[in-house]
Image (tube, grey):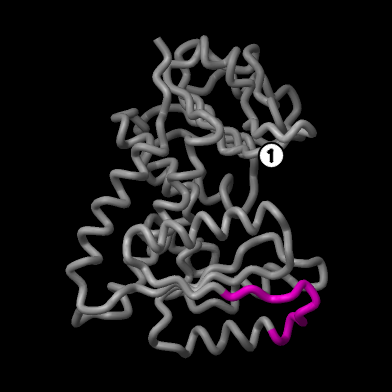
Amino acid sequence: MTIKLDGKSVSENIFTKLKSHIALLASKPTLAVIIVGTNAASQVYVKNKIKACEKIGIISNHIHLDASVSQNDLLQMIESLNADHTINGILIQLPLPSHISEKKIIQAIHPKKDVDGFHYSNIGALSIGLPKFISCTPLGILTLLQHYSIEISQKHVVIVGRSNIVGKPLAMLLTNHDATVTLCHSKTPSLENFTTQADILISCVGKPNFITLSMVKEGAVVVDVGINRLDNGTLVGDVSYETVSKLASFITPVPGGVGPMTIASLMENTLKAYKIQTPCM
């Protein structure tokens, strides 16, 4: 019988614990959330992050900039937030307009305020098994697997998707937990040869219903990171849920699986940043 990995309920448990912890602090953690432009999906994601902050007692500083803002002006704003001792975490909602370099913007955030875990120093620390801030989606996936007591050590994990945000840091994170990790992508030849070997199959390729029944080993744990909106407005993942769920032992739904865990991890990272910056709290 397939078990649904319910990220919504697990994240609510995390929120409850964080709220209780934050209520005891002398001051409140503060997260600056910057969004550039009017991308509809980005606006929804930012709204959900701000809502989570309000739920648990984190102060959110929402900064909405016009799409025409210059890269230099954005960099100056980040430098100002870096220097502001009342700001504990800085988040840049991606994607950014094409005239702005995401790499330059991400690297401008001080590593101690990099609650997204994208800065080179945080990625480098993760690669050698000494993580400070772990990227939110990989951390959320790990937390979800651990909540359901799914063994990671000595398991073969196949990740489909090599982004700097999910695939690559997730591969390092699970390797640090003694998994044997194969990192694939949409251009991997004979992809089924790899996915059907997976004890844990994770798709973050961003293509609707990309993972089909023939690509999954019976009894595998299937984690779907994809959030894709079809022409009719329906949200679906990378995994063909209705068919694959009949073969998998555990599977995440879309929505309600990895998404809520990503936000919960962001809240955890923001509290962690506060503690790092407020040693005598």
Horizontal and vertical percent for residue 13?
Answer: 29, 44
Classify the position of the N terminus by image quarter.
top left
Classify the position of the C terminus by image quarter.
bottom left
Question: Which residue appears at 64% of the width and 58% of the height?
Answer: 43
In magenta stretch: residue 65: yes
The foreground one among 54 and 110 is 54
Horizontal and vertical percent for residue 159?
Answer: 57, 35
Determine crowd level at label 1: few under 14, some 14-19, many 20+ residues with C-alpha closer than 10 A: some
Horizontal and vertical percent for residue 228?
Answer: 68, 37
Residue 62 position by quadrant: bottom right
Question: Which residue appears at 78% of the width and 67% of the height?
Answer: 97
Instruction: Judge left or right: residue 72 versus residue 79.
Output: right
In magenta stretch: residue 230: no
Say what secondary structure mark 1 lies in: loop
The foreground one among 61 and 258 is 61
Residue 250 position by quadrant: top left
Q: Where does the magenta region start and end?
A: 63-73
Q: Looking at numbered disc 1 in the image, what kind of residue is underneath it?
A: Gly
Q: Is residue 152 above or below residue 69?
A: above
